[in-house]
């Protein structure tokens, strides 16, 4: 049965049915109720046989920065960065925490008609209209950084690099940002300062970083409570105090299991009894301002940068996530799960959208 299923998806995804070992990638469109979804189909051979992965691209294929979970204040900061002067914006997250969606949302928030926007990517999953996309093909003689230099020479206003894997490319990206372009770089990191640490180590040139880096973002995804069945409650005073909730704050959580008069379970039709539908991002932002630049230029360590940044506030992912609890978007339990360090965390049980 597994082979027939894989064959079916390969067929409608436009892949070569005979090829069972080499990785392949294709695409199909699925209609569920009134909604159309793009589905990316991937297959590859492994020791356990041929494997199939499907990724459903939903509404996030149209997201701009107001759609990804940033607070109003954070949207204003992001707008300033997007429309402000040239520089590099570092977007970080652990794997599968929405980073790809965020990078493309930033990209879509630029004006594709007035600006020359170009990307350099290892692979393309989500389509964006009116921008020039370059896909890097693994090549010993032509490293990624070489391709990136070629892109930079064509003088784009905006350069989007969803993934950087080598130090030379980090330097090329920083130079482009210091000279003229707005550059978005995606980087996997376990928290904001882990991202900053990796970037500082990659570029390894405090002057160049001071001239180019404008902000570091870090994000996680939380599941959103089902709007149909979420249930209000008042937590005990100790919990209220611990999370800094206003005195009369009402919180929400999934309902207790319910049964009808015959003893049959009542299941919410909207979420199939899961209690959550969809996910949203929780962000913290560090603006790399003159104060931090000075710390870096004076040879300050990561600890020094952290100390200087701590006074600015807005860096606690948990506090940002709690705002979403007070707004009734998600639950305390979900925030605790989602803001743990990636190593001690299990994947969300209903996670289906990667990246
Ligand atoms: Zn529900």
Image (cartoon, rainbow, N blue to C red):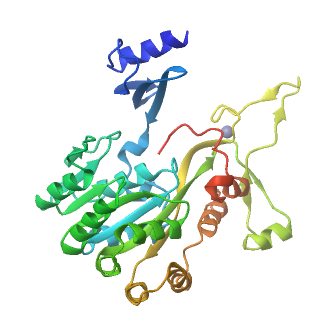
Instruction: Say which residue appears at 52% left-offset and 23% top-offset.
Output: 47
Where 276 falls versus 87 (above or below)?
above
Image quadrant, ligand 1: top right
Instruction: Say which residue appears at 52% left-offset and 51% top-offset.
Output: 97
Q: Position of residue 199 (x, y in %)?
A: 41, 67
In-image side of 135 versus 239 (left or right): left
Q: Is residue 306 visible?
A: yes
Name the foreground residue: 175 vs 265. 175
In-image side of 248 versus 172 (left or right): right
Q: Is residue 37 visible?
A: no
Task: Choose top left, top right, bottom left or bottom right for residue 271.
Answer: top right
Task: Choose top left, top right, bottom left or bottom right for residue 79.
Answer: bottom left
Where 228 falls versus 194 (above or below)?
above
Name the foreground residue: 98 vs 33. 98
Q: Position of residue 160 (x, y in %)?
A: 28, 56
Instruction: Say which residue appears at 17% left-offset and 60% top-offset.
Output: 152
Name the foreground residue: 295 vs 234. 295
């Amino acid at each position: 049965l597994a082979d027939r299923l894989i064959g079916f998806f390969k067929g409608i995804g436009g892949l070569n049915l005979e090829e069972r070992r080499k990785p392949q990638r294709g695409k199909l469109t699925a209609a569920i109720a009134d909604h159309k979804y793009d589905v990316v189909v991937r297959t590859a051979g492994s020791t356990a046989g041929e494997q199939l992965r499907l990724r459903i691209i939903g509404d996030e294929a149209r997201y701009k920065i107001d759609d990804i979970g940033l607070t109003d204040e954070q949207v204003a900061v992001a707008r300033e960065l997007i429309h402000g002067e040239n520089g590099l914006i570092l977007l970080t997250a652990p794997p599968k925490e929405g980073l790809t969606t965020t990078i493309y949302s930033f990209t879509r928030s630029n004006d594709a008609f007035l600006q020359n926007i170009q990307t350099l990517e290892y692979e393309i999953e989500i389509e964006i209209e009116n921008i020039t996309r370059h896909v890097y093909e693994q090549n010993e003689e032509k490293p990624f950084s070489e391709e990136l230099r070629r892109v930079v020479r064509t003088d784009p206003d905006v350069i989007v690099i969803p993934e950087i894997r080598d130090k030379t490319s980090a330097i090329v990206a920083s130079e482009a940002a210091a000279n003229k372009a707005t550059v978005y770089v995606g980087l996997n990191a376990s928290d904001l300062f882990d991202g900053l640490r990796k970037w500082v180590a990659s570029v390894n040139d405090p002057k160049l970083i001071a001239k180019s880096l404008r902000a570091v973002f870090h994000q996680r995804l939380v599941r959103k409570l089902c709007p149909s069945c979420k249930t209000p409650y008042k937590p005990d005073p100790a919990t209220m105090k611990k999370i800094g909730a206003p005195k009369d704050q009402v919180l929400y959580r999934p309902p207790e299991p319910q049964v009808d008069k015959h003893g049959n379970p009542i299941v919410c039709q909207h979420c199939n009894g899961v209690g959550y539908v969809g996910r949203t991002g929780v962000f913290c932002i560090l603006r790399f301002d003159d104060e931090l630049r000075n710390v870096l230029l004076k040879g300050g360590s990561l600890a020094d940068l952290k100390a200087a940044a701590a006074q600015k506030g807005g860096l606690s992912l948990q506090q940002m996530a709690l705002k979403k609890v007070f707004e009734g978007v998600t639950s305390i339990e979900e925030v605790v799960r989602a803001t743990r360090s990636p190593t001690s965390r299990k994947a969300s049980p209903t996670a289906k959208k990667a990246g």
